[in-house]
Image: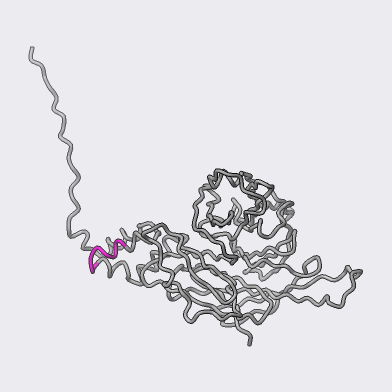
Amino acid sequence: MASSSSRRPRPTSPSPVSAHQLEDDNLLHEIMLRLPPQPPYLLRASIVSKRWRRLATDPKFLRRFRIHHRKPPLLGVFSCTCGHISFRSTLDPPFRIPPELFSLSPPIRSNQMCLDVRHGRVLIDDGMWDRWGGAGDQGHVHGACHPSPFKVVVIISDEHDDDLSDEDDDYKPVVLASVYSSETGMWSDLISTTIPGRGINLSLRSTLVGNTLSWLVNSPFMLEFDLEAQILAVTRRPRGAHRGDKVQIIQAEDGGIGIAALSGSGPSLQMWDRKVDSHGLATWVLRKSLELQNILGLESRIEKGKSSILHYVEDVKAILLQVRSSVYMVQLESLQSKKLFKSSQKCIYRPFTSLYTEGNCLLILTLQDS
């Protein structure tokens, strides 16, 4: 009896990509568009050949690249003190950006202060007024040398309690807000609200969540400005989130306003979400509470007074922390941490996020008295 044997079909190897396909500029642009937004990838593609460099640095393509990725990575931080601002890259070698690429020329004067860094822009105060600022815009394109329209919000304190007696409990200091629009080149009318207590202690760290810019203000309050509705309001923080260097306004899990706070002697990192019911009543809900020592992977316990929150990085949903003499970044969704650098100086750190490509520039905005 004859046995029959079945033959297995030989595996076929995929046909190689024809050379002429990669000669199609449109196809190559589509491939480059899908590269990760971190600096090395597009820069590496640009050195393959003169043609690839031309395609990778084409202004129209770069705009599509920035719009496609939307949320840019953290490139570094600006260290700010009165009269001095410098850039420090937080990327791993060999992709660290030289600080001179983001240097300010001419340098700021001794009476000037860096108020904010957001969307590829640095906001400088001329040092003449007692005021605070924050930059915010919609539909922005990170890193573009021809930036999209933007807005600047300036908060001015109006305090006249020098001659008031301690028995005058009716006095409340006033804060005023005005908005500058780059589209109209004009400032809005003043918008005001009062703050409970005597004196105004407003944090220099603003947080942009949706259309709202927020600042920590006299404990236990915070100040919120709605860019669309042009409304200035004072709201309460969660209980226990009082000390300014231990508290940071963040984006909550549902996209609303949240709070990150260091609590206790450990300390623990707490994350609070603000929930608003159908009647408009807001309550704070504790979402997470974890030991900071465990998040950072430290062997020894963090001593009391040796930790603080420096800033919130909106585009990557992370906070910058200083523990002892080291600065860390903690991504609040994954709780992954990274040690960025050591610092023994007392200064303000402004995170800088952007899609770094050839031809990046930095737009300097200066608030000046008229």
Tell which of 38 and 201 is nearer to you.
201
Residue 360, percent from left and from top: 40, 71
Is the magenta region chiefly helix, strand or loop?
Answer: helix
Residue 197's image quarter? bottom right
Tell me if residue 305 comes above or below residue 186 in the rendering.
Answer: above
Q: Quadrant of the N terminus?
A: top left
Q: Residue extending furthest bottom? A: 370
**Number of numbered markers:** 0
| Residue 293 in the image, given as x and y percentages of width and height | 58, 45
Q: At 48% across and 73% down in the image, what residue appears?
A: 148
Residue at 73 percent of width and 75 percent of height: 157
Q: Nearer the viewer, residue 8 or 357?
A: 357
Which of 2/226 is in front? 226
* Quarter of the figure with the C terminus: bottom right
Q: Is residue 23 magenta?
A: no
Residue at the far right: name it: 167
Residue toward you, 366 or 62: 366
Q: Residue at x 58, y 44 (%)?
A: 300
Which contiguous range is marked in magenta?
A: 44-51
Q: Is residue 101 left or right of residue 320?
A: left
Task: Write down the quadrant of residue 111 in the picture.
Answer: bottom right
Q: Is residue 3 above or below residue 113?
A: above
Question: With 13 as the anchor, is 352 left or right in this view?
Answer: right
Residue depicted at 66% across the width and 56% down the height: 246
Q: Position of residue 245 (x, y in %)?
A: 66, 59
Asked if residue 50 is among those painted magenta in the image, a careful observer would answer: yes
Tell me if 58 is positioned left or right of 16 in this view. right
339 left or right of 68? right
Residue 84: where, in percent of width, then height?
54, 74
